[in-house]
Image (cartoon, rainbow, N blue to C red):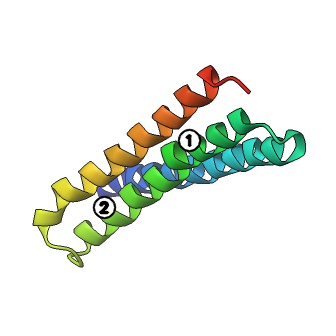
């Protein structure tokens, strides 16, 4: 039973890491589109994707590792969740703005 739990933890970690890398890649491609076409909409899209995926996942992942390892006391769980959700909100806000902005 312990082996299944360990495998699940590794899969969760691998998926979180993969999502972070993939989100960073998509954000980078949007940034390249901004640089290529000098499009403000693409700039806002790239910033939004980075905030929504890469930054939010890194904050959540590193924060959860620090909490589990006892490097941060449990009282920091809610503030870390708040920071993660704030990055997600800002990311979606930038993406929404990029879809409605006129050049």
Q: Residue at x 53, y 36 (%)?
A: 94
Residue toward you, 57 or 34: 34
Q: Is residue 75 above or below residue 101?
A: below
Q: Is residue 1 visible?
A: no
Task: State the residue lying farthest toward the bottom.
Answer: 71
Horizontal and vertical percent position of residue 13: 46, 55
In what element is the residue under mark 1? helix
10 Å neighbourhood of mark 1: few (<14), some, or many (≥20)? many
Residue 64: which numbered mark, if any? 2
Horizontal and vertical percent position of residue 73: 14, 72
Horizontal and vertical percent position of residue 1: 29, 51
Task: State the residue lying farthest toward the front.
Answer: 103
Question: Which residue has dot 1 on it?
Answer: 48
Quadrant containing the C terminus is top right
10 Å neighbourhood of mark 2: few (<14), some, or many (≥20)? some
Residue toward you, 55 or 8: 55
């Amino acid at each position: 039973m312990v082996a299944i739990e360990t495998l699940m933890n590794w899969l969760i970690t691998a998926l979180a890491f993969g999502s972070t890398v993939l989100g960073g890649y998509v954000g980078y491609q949007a940034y390249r589109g901004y640089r290529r076409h000098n499009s403000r909409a693409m700039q806002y899209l790239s910033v939004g994707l980075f905030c929504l995926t890469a930054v939010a996942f890194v904050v959540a992942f590193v924060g959860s590792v620090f909490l589990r390892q006892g490097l941060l006391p449990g009282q920091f769980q809610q503030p870390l969740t708040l920071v993660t959700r704030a990055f997600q909100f800002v990311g979606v806000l930038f993406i929404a703005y990029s879809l409605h902005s006129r050049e």
